[in-house]
Structures are given as C-alpha cells and as structure tokens.
C-alpha cells in the first residue's frame, strides 16, 4: 500500500554563490549536483526527458527543491535544482503598497502578518482584500466603543443628571477590557498561524480549555469587584486567545467537510446549528438563573457553572473524536510508521483517527521520530536507515 502526500518543510533555504553555480559532491556511489535557478527560468525539453524527478521539497518561503535522477552517464547522479520565485515578475501596477511581495516591509513583520509562502501560497486577490478589510474592522470597533457607552446609559449608568461622565468612564473600562483581550488574538494569529492546518482537533480542544480558564477570571469579579478591570481583562485575554485558536481550527474542519467545494453552504448550515444551540442555551441559562437562591448563593452558582463546563468539555472531546481526516499529519504519520515497524501493517483512515491522541502534543508522543529531513542531509550524514522516513 502506498500513500502519496506532500509536506511543507520549515527549513531555511540554502544559499548559493551564483544562479548557475554547480557544485559536485561525492556521496558513496551517488553524486549529487546542486544548481539554483530563478523562478522565471525553465528546464528544457531535453532536460525533462533525460532527468526524472524523484523527490520534491517545498520550503516555507515558497522555494522548491527538485531532486532529479540522471542515469545517462556511467555514474548515477542526483541533481538538486533550487527554484526561487522572482519577486519582480509579479508586481502590480501602482504604489509600493500594492506590491504583492511587499518588498518594502520588514521580513519579520511579513512573517507575522502574512501566510507562509506569500504570495504564492494564496490567491491573487488576498492582499487587496486584507488591505480593505483592515480599515473596515477599525471603523467597526469604533462603532462598538460608541455603542457600549449608550448601552451602559440604557441600563442606568449615567442616566441621571450630573452623572453623565460615569457612563464614559465605565465605557472606557469596558472597552479597555476588550482591547487587552484583543492582544491575545493578535499574538495567536501572528505567531502560531501555521499550527492549525496540521492538527485542528487538538487546537480546537485547547481553545475550550483556555476559554474555561478565562471564565474563571470572570466569575471571580463578583468576589473582588474592586479588581474588576484586571480580572475581567485577564478573562478577556484568555477567551481571546481561545477564540484565536478556535476560529482557524474550525475553518480547517469546515473545509474538511466541504468535499464538493461547497464551503459557503457548509458554513451557512453550521451557522443555523450554532444559532439554534445559542437560543436554546440562553433560554436554559435564564431558567437556571431564575432558580430561587441561585443568584444569591455564590457557591451554588460556581458549582452549577463547573458542572455545565465539565459536560461541555466532555461533549467537545466526543465531537472532535468523531472527525475522520483522510490526510496525514505528524501524529497520524507517527502512528503509521510505528504500526509498520512493530506490526508490519498500515492502519486505515478510520483506525488512525480513532487512535489519535487529541489532548497530547505530538512532540511529547513516544517514540520520537524526526520528520522533514532533507534528502541531502540523509545521504550525506551517518544517520541510520531506520531514521529515514
């Protein structure tokens, strides 16, 4: 049984002295010839007919390394071609802001705000959409700030003469709480954006754990009202981090569902389920709050919340365990390798997803296996063949 899949390797691209500089190395009975070329250059038809691609390595910066087998000569040769995309070949017309590669932007900032391999890893309209979406979100949050003040006035804060400043002060505290929480989403999206495609089930579960911790901070504000701002801010920060983990993970899950290219319909139908559950949950929550003595008894309130939260986490785990991804991530690849070595069999899709550990981070799973080793390193080092996947 053979499995075909591609891996995106987080290794830095090698540096060559010149675009056509060729370096020859002796590796046992094999010779590897390394050459780099710009993205606009192509192999000739004769090269394609004589050379056979045996391995393709994709690096996170968009660089592609092709290993070609050349058996025309007496000695077996492996040629490694490094393809780099020319940043000047796809420029838009106009200002530097419309540059699809954003060459004027520092590399650290580009890696923080843009997907790995940009612009080759996204569609052509990605940058234009994001540049327009950013000010749209800014104006939306300005409206949110203004509306918050009106809502506080409506519930009685600052509704009497001489206390109008109280509503503004309360609005500032409330919005500051939201702003501190937004920092968590900013950090998660910029720093850990490449984690969700590999293991959405794990990160969706982690999101609920972190969100539960945020709710604990919110519950303690009733006990320490003088520390409302720091406690509520910590709660919002935790819940914002949870949302930063939840939303990208769930988008990967939605994309997994849309096998017919109907992602929009899948998202719309999921919204129906979510809103229905929200209305039902709010109704039940109101009934629980109307229970005599529950609002006045803080221990009873906390115990009720803890019971509901544990039930929520258990149901979340069951729902994620029901997912059956037909792709190979690091966890499932580890299971395939271990089963092949120890039992001489390759488990199927259902078995891999059923036995996959959702809660444990893959780097802590035993045995430890090294993935994504470049072919050049495998041929040139003293690694045992048991380490080569």
Image (cartoon, rainbow, N blue to C red):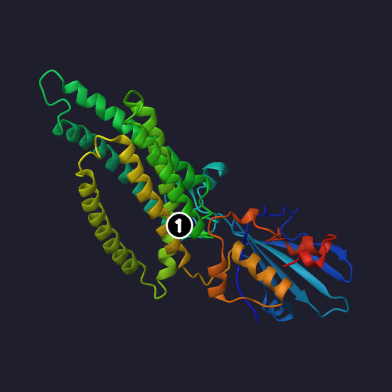
Q: Which residue is mark 1?
A: 249
Quadrant location of the N terminus in the rendered image: bottom right
Q: Is 61 in front, or is 261?
A: 261
Residue 152 locus on image (x, y percent):
19, 32
Task: Looking at this view, name the residue that lies furthest to the left.
Answer: 161
Task: Looking at this view, name the residue that lies furthest to the top.
Answer: 162
Residue 336 locus on image (x, y percent):
65, 70
Residue shown at 25% from the left, 30% from the top: 171
Around disc 1, counting alpha carbons within 10 Å, would you say few (fewer than 14), some (14 to 19), or many (20 or more)?
A: many
Residue 301 locus on image (x, y percent):
31, 40
Count of marks placed on residues: 1
Q: Is 378 in front, or is 211?
A: 211
Residue 125 visible in the displayed image? no
Quadrant in which residue 14 is drawn: bottom right
Quadrant in which residue 380 is drawn: bottom right
Quadrant location of the C terminus in the rendered image: bottom right
Q: Is 17 in front, or is 136?
A: 136
In the picture shown, does residue 211 fall above or below 75? above
Residue 206 locus on image (x, y percent):
48, 51
Residue 152 visible in the displayed image? yes
Residue shown at 85% from the left, 63% from the top: 25
Q: Check disc 1 and report its element: helix, strand or loop.
A: helix
In the picture shown, does residue 177 fall above or below 318? above
Left or right placement of residue 33 versus residue 221 in this view: right
């Amino acid at each position: 049984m053979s499995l075909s899949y591609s891996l995106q390797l987080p290794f830095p691209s090698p540096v060559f002295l010149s675009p056509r500089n060729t370096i020859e190395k002796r590796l046992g009975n094999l010779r590897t010839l390394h050459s780099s070329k710009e993205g606009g250059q192509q192999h000739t038809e004769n090269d394609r007919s004589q050379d056979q691609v045996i391995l393709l390595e994709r690096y996170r910066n968009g660089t592609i390394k092709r290993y070609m087998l050349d058996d025309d000569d007496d000695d077996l040769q492996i040629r490694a071609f490094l393809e780099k995309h020319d940043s000047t070949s796809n420029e838009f017309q106009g200002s530097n802001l419309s540059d699809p590669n954003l060459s004027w932007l520092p590399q650290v900032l580009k890696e923080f705000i843009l997907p790995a391999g940009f612009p080759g890893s996204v569609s052509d309209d990605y940058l234009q959409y994001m540049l327009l979406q950013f000010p749209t979100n800014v104006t939306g949050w300005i409206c949110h700030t203004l509306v918050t003040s009106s809502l506080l006035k409506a519930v009685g804060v600052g509704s009497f003469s001489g206390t109008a400043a109280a509503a503004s002060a309360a609005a500032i505290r409330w919005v500051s709480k939201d702003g501190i929480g937004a920092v968590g989403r900013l950090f998660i999206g910029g720093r850990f954006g490449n984690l969700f495609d590999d293991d959405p089930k794990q990160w969706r579960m982690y999101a609920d754990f972190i969100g539960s911790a945020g709710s604990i901070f919110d519950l303690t504000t009733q006990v320490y009202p003088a520390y409302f701002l720091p406690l509520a801010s910590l709660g919002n920060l935790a819940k914002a981090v949870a949302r930063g983990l939840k939303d990208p993970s769930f988008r990967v899950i939605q994309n997994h569902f849309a096998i017919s290219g109907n992602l929009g319909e899948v998202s719309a139908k999921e919204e129906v389920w979510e809103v229905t559950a929200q209305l039902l949950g709010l109704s039940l929550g109101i009934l629980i709050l109307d229970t005599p003595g529950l609002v006045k008894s803080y221990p009873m309130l906390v115990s009720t919340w803890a019971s509901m939260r544990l039930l929520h986490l258990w149901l979340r785990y069951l729902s994620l365990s029901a997912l059956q991804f037909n792709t190979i991530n690091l966890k499932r690849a580890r299971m395939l390798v271990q089963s092949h070595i120890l039992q001489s069999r390759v488990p199927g899709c259902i078995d891999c997803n059923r036995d996959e550990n959702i809660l444990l981070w893959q780097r802590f799973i035993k045995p430890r296996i090294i993935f994504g080793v470049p072919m050049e390193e495998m041929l040139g080092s003293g690694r045992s063949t048991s380490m080569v996947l």
